[in-house]
Amino acid sequence: MSGVRLLVGTRKGAFVLTSDGTRDRWEVGGPHFGGWEIYHLKGSPVDPNRLYASQSSSWFGQVIQRSHDGGKTWESVGNKFVYDGVPGTHLWYDGTPRPWEFARVWHLEPSLTDPDTVHAGIQDAALFRSTDGGQSWQELPGLRQHPSATVWQPGAGGMCLHTILLDPSRPGRIFVAISAAGVFRSDDAGKTWRPMNRGLRSEQIPDPTAEVGHCVHRIAMHRSRPDVLFMQKHWDVMRSDDAGESWREISGNLPTDFGFPIDVHAHEPETIYVVPIKSDSEHYLPDGKLRVYRSRTGGQEWEPLTRGLPQRDCYVNVLRDAMAVDSLDPCGVYVGTTGGQVYASADAGDSWAAIVRDLPSVVSVEAQTLP
Amino acid sequence: MTIRVVLPAHLRTLAHVDGEVKLDVGAPATQRAVLDALEAGYPMLRGTIRDQVTHRRRAFVRFFACEQDLSHEAPDAPLPEAVATGAEPLLIVGAMAGGC
C-alpha cells in the first residue's frame, strides 16, 4: 500500500513522520540531530530513500547529513562550502558594502534524475552543487557574480537563497529565489543567470520596480506546467505564465497578502495554497486563526480552509519551506508552524488534523509519496 | 604522546564517540597538532571547531585546560605540559549561552 513520509526540519532537530496511504495514523520518528537547527531535508525524486539534510548550529557551523534508508540511519558528508574565487561584496541592511560570508544551507534540492546530484541554496546567497552524493560541493558562481549582486541586500532572516526549482521539461533550466534580491533563472544548468522580476512591486526599496531587490519569500511550480510560476512575495501573491519573464498580482480577496509559503496541488495545476500572515512587523496569523487559503482558479479568488485548524488564540507563523503536498489522490497538504504543530489534510485542504502538536518550532516540511 | 580531548556533547554525538577522545600527537603538542589529529581521526568534525580554509577557531568554540582559557593562544603555541603528557584533558567547549 502506498504511504507518505514527511521530513520535518525544526529549530532543534529533524523528525520523520510516516503514514500509510489513508493518512489517518502517523508514526513520529526522531528527533534526529537533536539540538541542531535543521533548516531543510529532502529526498531524491528517483531514489526516495536517499535523503539529504542541512544541520547547522551557531556554535559548530554547517553539517550535511545523508541517508540511504529513508531516514533510519544517517551519515555526515561534505560540509565545505567555499565561494569560487575571491567573493566581492553585497549590501548590508544599512546599505554599506559587506563581504560575502557563508552562514548556512537553507535549502537542498536533489536532482530530478540522479540521486548523487544535489543543489544547495546558502546564506550569503549562492548556489552550490554536489555530484558525489554530498561529499564535495562546488559553487555555480555565475549567479553570485551577476552584475546586480553587488546591490543585493539581506532580508530579516539573512541574505539567503531559499528556493530552487528544477524545470522537469527543460534540463538545465533552474529557478532560484533570494531574499531580498528576487527570482533568477538559468537556462544553461547554472552557468549564467537573468533576474526575472518584471512586474514585481516592492515599496520597501527606493525604486519599487527595480530589476533586483525584491524580497521574494517563495516560488512554486506544477511539474506539468513549468512555465507557470506562483510566488509569495514579502507582500503580494504573484503569478507568471511565461517562466518568470513577467509577473502579475493574484492576491485577490486574501485577508492579507503577506506570508511565506506557497504550493501547488499535485494534480490540479491551477489550485494553489498560501497561509496569509498579518504583516511583516507582526509575523503571526491574522485574528488568531490559522487559515490556509486555497485558490482553484490560479489566484485572485481564494477560500479559507479552516476545518480542523485552530480558529482562536493562535499566533504562530508558517515559514517559507514549511508547506508541502503529497501526490496521492486526493492530494495531501501539510503545514508546519513555529509553534511546533504539523497539520495534515488528506482531502486537498477541506479538513485538517494535527499529526503532532508539540515539536520544536518547525522550519521546513517536505512530503514524499511512497509506493 | 597521547593527548586526551573532551568534546562538547553535540560533537561527541556527531563523531559517534562516548567520553574522551585519545589522540596520538607528535611533539610539540599544540592546538593545531591536536586539531589536525582530531579531524584526521574524525573527519565529520571538520569545520565544526575551526574554519576549514582559514583554520580560525569558530567564534562560539573555546579551548580550556588546566583551569585556563587557551582560546586565544596561538595555534602553534605548545599546550600545557599536563595536557601534552595526558595528565589533563584539553576541553573543547561550546561557549556558554542560553536563549533559544
Image: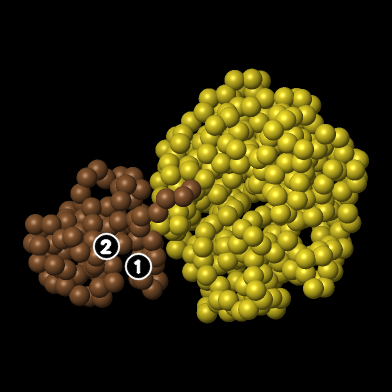
C-alpha distance separating marks 1 and 2: 9 Å
Q: Position of residue A97 (x, y in %)?
A: 61, 79
Residue closer to the observer: A139 or A153 = A153
Secondary structure under badge 2?
Answer: strand
**Residue beneath the point at 66% across and 40% down:** A316
Q: Is residue A224 visible?
A: yes
Is B88 situated left or right of B71 in this image?
Answer: left
**Disc 1 is attached to a residue of which chain?**
B
**Picture quadrant where residue A361 is located:** top right
- What kind of colouring is applied to the model shown? by chain
Residue closer to the observer: B85 or A144 = B85
User: What is the display colour for chain B?
Assistant: brown
Q: Where is residue A324 in the image (x, y as percent from the top left)?
A: 68, 39
Q: Looking at the colours in the rendered structure, which chain would you say is drawn in yellow?
A: A
**Residue beneath the point at 75% across and 45% down:** A277
Q: Where is residue A130 in the image (x, y as percent from the top left)?
A: 52, 58
Is A204 situated left or right of A144 in this image?
Answer: right
- Kindly check if marks 1 and 2 are in contact, taking CB atoms under 8 A apart as contact: yes
Is A60 situated left or right of A197 in this image?
Answer: left
Question: Dot 1 corresponds to which residue?
Answer: B57
Question: Dot 2 corresponds to which residue?
Answer: B63
Question: From the viewer's perspective, is residue A362 above or below residue B51?
Answer: above
Number of residue marks: 2
Secondary structure under badge 1?
Answer: loop
**Residue beneath the point at 20% across and 64% down:** B68
**Disc 2 is attached to a residue of which chain?**
B
Amino acid type, residue under disc 1 in the picture: Arg
